[in-house]
Image (cartoon, rainbow, N blue to C red):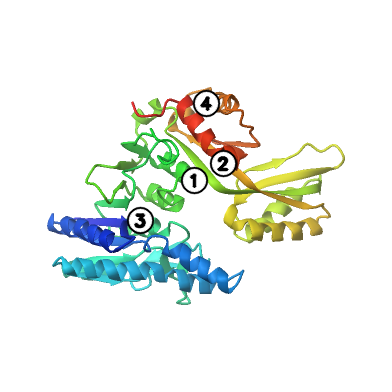
Amino acid sequence: MAKTIIVQKYGGTSVADVDRIRNAAKKVVKTKKDGYNVVVVVSALGDSTDELIRLAHKITEHPNERELDMLISTGEQVSCALLTMAIHKFGEDAISFTGAQVGIITDNAFTKARIIDINAKRIVEELNSDKIVIVAGFQGVNLNQDITTLGRGGSNLTAVALAKVLDAGSCEMYTDVEGVFTADPRIVKDARKLDRISYEEMFELASLGAQVLQPRSIEFAMKFGVPIHVRSSFSNKVGTIISKEVKAMEDTVVSGVALNKDEAKVTICDVPDKPGIAAKIFKEIAKEDINVDMIVQNVSRTGATDVSFTVPGVDLNKTIRVAKEISNKIAAGAVAFDKDIAKVSVVGIGMKSHSGVAASMFEALAEENINIEMISTSEIKISCVVRKIHAEKAVRAIHEKFGLSKK
C-alpha cells in the first residue's frame, strides 16, 4: 500500500538560523521515520525577503516588478538548499527544487501571481524513490518562463496547493506560535489558543490582519477541502485544526479579534455626485490590481461629495497616483491620504445567529474613548477604522468585552 503523503511548511522564523534549520530537519526526518512520504515547503530565512526588498529600493524607488520577483524568489531557494543539506546530515535522502522545477505554473501578475496549474510528476517520482522532497515556497513560473512570486505569505499557498495536487493526508503549517489564538498574543497577553476554527473564520481573520496564514491559502484550502494543522516548530503540542464549519462552532459568538496596522485611507474630494462616477473611480483602481476595502461616500449637499476608501499601506503611493489621474478625468478636487489609521475587527461564525455583537464592540471602544472613523460588516465580521495610536488598546478592550481570554 502506498505511503500517506504529509506536506509540511516551515515559515521564516522556523528556519531563521542554522540551529532552527537543524530543528526543522529533525522534525522532517522524524515524520519520514514514522512511515510517511514527506514534502516540505520552506519560506526564506527570517527577514531575508524584507532585506532583499529594502536592497531593491536602495537601487530604485520603483523597482520593476519582474526583476523584483527574480530577486526575492532567491530567499526561498537558500533555505530550501540548506534544509536539504541538514536532512542529509541526519542520514535521510532528500532533494530540493524551485517552484519552477516542480511545475508550479502561474499567471503573469508579478509579486502577487495566482497558481494556474501544478505538474507534480517530478515530486511523485522522487517520493517513489523514497526521497524527502523540499520545495521553495512563494514562487512559480509563468508561461513565458519568467519567475513569479505569490505575494506575502505565499509559501502557505504553495503548501496547500501541493497538498491538494498530491492528495496529501495532512497539511501541517509550522510557525513560531502554537496555533491560532483569539488575538495576537503579543498584544493580548492572555489570548487563548483555539483547538479548532472554520475555514470561513480563518479566512476573515487572515484577511483582516492575523498574520498566521495568507488569506489566499485559506481560500484555496476551503475550496478544495484541504484540512490544515497550524502548529509550533518549537514544541510537539497539538496546534489548531482549520477545517469546514461544524455545528458546535455556532455556540461561540466571536472567535477572534484581528488588527491590521498596514492600512491607509485615501479621499478624493469634491467628486461630482452623479450616476456612474463611483464605477469610473473604482474601475480605474481595479486596473492597477489594488484591493479596496472600506468605502464611504459623504452625503452630497452641493452637487459634489467626498469619496474615501481604504487600501493596503503597501499600495498607497500607487493609489495616490491613480486617484490623482482619476480626479483630473472626472473634474473632482484634491486627493488626500491618511497613513495613521488601523483596522480592528471581530470575527465569528456565531454572529450569523446572535444579535448585539456590533453594539458590544462599539461599546468597548467608547469605554476607552476611542473614536470610530469607518465601519464595515459582513455575515461573520465587523471592522472599524480607528487611529493607529489607539489600535492595540482597542484590540485589548474588545477582546475583554467578548470574554475571549483564557478560562
> Under tag 2, what secondary structure?
strand
Question: Pointer 1: what residue?
Answer: 209
Give whichever of discs 3 and 1 has the lower sequence position: 3
Name the spot of residue 304 as percent of width and height, x first: 83, 44
- Contact? badges 2 and 1 (CB < 8 Å): yes
State left or right for residue 349 relative to residue 286: left
Name the spot of residue 280 as percent of width and height, x first: 73, 54
Comparing 23 with 92, the one in front is 23
> Under tag 1, what secondary structure?
loop
Question: Pointer 3: what residue?
Answer: 13
Whether 125 is drawn above or below 343: the answer is below
Q: What kind of residue is marked 1? A: Gly
Label 1 crowding class (10 Å Cα cut-off): few <14, some 14-19, many 20+?
many
Name the spot of residue 262 as percent of width and height, x first: 56, 50
Question: Pointer 2: what residue?
Answer: 343
Q: What kind of residue is marked 2? A: Lys
Q: Residue shown at 68%/52% (left/top)? A: 282
Nearer to us: label 1 or label 4 = 1
What is the distance, in whole Å, between disc 1 and disc 4 at their CAs? 20 Å
What is the distance, in whole Å, between disc 2 and disc 1 at their CAs? 8 Å
Name the spot of residue 68 as percent of width and height, x first: 51, 71
Q: What kind of residue is marked 3? A: Thr
Q: Quadrant of residue 241?
A: top left
Q: Residue shown at 37%/31% (left/top)? A: 249
Give whichever of discs 2 and 1 has the lower sequence position: 1
- Contact? badges 2 and 3 (CB < 8 Å): no
Question: Pointer 4: what residue?
Answer: 357
Quadrant containing the N terminus is bottom left
- Contact? badges 2 and 4 (CB < 8 Å): no
Determine if residue 65 is in view. Answer: no
Q: Residue shown at 22%/67% (left/top)? A: 86
